[in-house]
Image (cartoon, grey):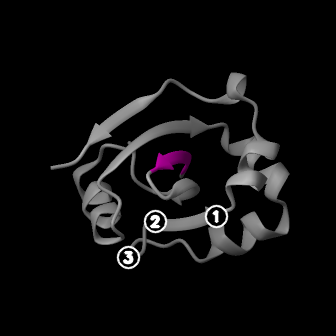
């Protein structure tokens, strides 16, 4: 499982996914289905995400399975930016959808 911060046109999201990469074609299809075609993604340290979100993380993680491999953990930009420092983010991954 991965935790990914997505910076999108409508704001930041923290997602949990079983896909190996933010650029996995099936994940891109799922994001496109949610109206997300263009984004900047950063991997987040999973242990830190688990610790900072606590019980909420556990609830979302338990709901993640093989048929539903994308779950939104957080969509509150102020909350996300309060929880994570830029120095904690992985390298930026840019995706410009068609």
**Horizontal relation, residue 40 to residue 33: left or right:** right
Real-space CA distance between mark 1 and mark 2, rounded to the nearest whole angstrom? 9 Å
Residue for badge 3: 67
Q: Residue at x 36, y 70 (%)?
A: 34
Q: Which numbered tag is attached to residue 56?
A: none
Residue in view at x 48 percent, y 73 percent? 65
Does residue 24 sit above or below 93 in this rendering? below
Q: Position of residue 88 (x, y in %)?
A: 70, 28
At x 47% / y 27%, what residue is drawn? 92
Q: Which region is colored magenta?
A: 2-8
- 93 is within the stretch colored magenta: no
Prevailing secondary structure of the magenta residues: strand
Q: Say above or below: 14 vs 81.
A: below
Instruction: From the image, tell me which residue sits under label 2.
Output: 70
Give the residue number, with chain letter if any, for mark 1.
Answer: 73
Q: Does the residue at mark 3 contact the one at mark 1 (Cβ under 8 Å)?
A: no
Can you give x and y, in whole percent of width and height, for residue 81 in the image?
Answer: 73, 44
Q: Quadrant of residue 58?
A: bottom right
């Amino acid at each position: 499982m991965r935790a990914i911060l997505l910076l999108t046109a409508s704001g930041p999201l923290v997602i949990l996914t079983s896909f190996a990469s933010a650029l996995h074609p099936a994940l891109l299809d799922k994001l496109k289905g949610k109206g997300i075609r263009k984004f900047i993604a950063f991997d987040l340290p999973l242990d830190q995400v688990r610790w900072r979100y606590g019980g909420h993380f556990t609830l979302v993680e338990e709901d993640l399975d093989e048929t539903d491999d994308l779950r939104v953990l957080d969509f509150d930009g102020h909350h996300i930016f309060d929880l994570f420092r830029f120095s904690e983010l992985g390298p930026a991954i840019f995706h410009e959808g068609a």
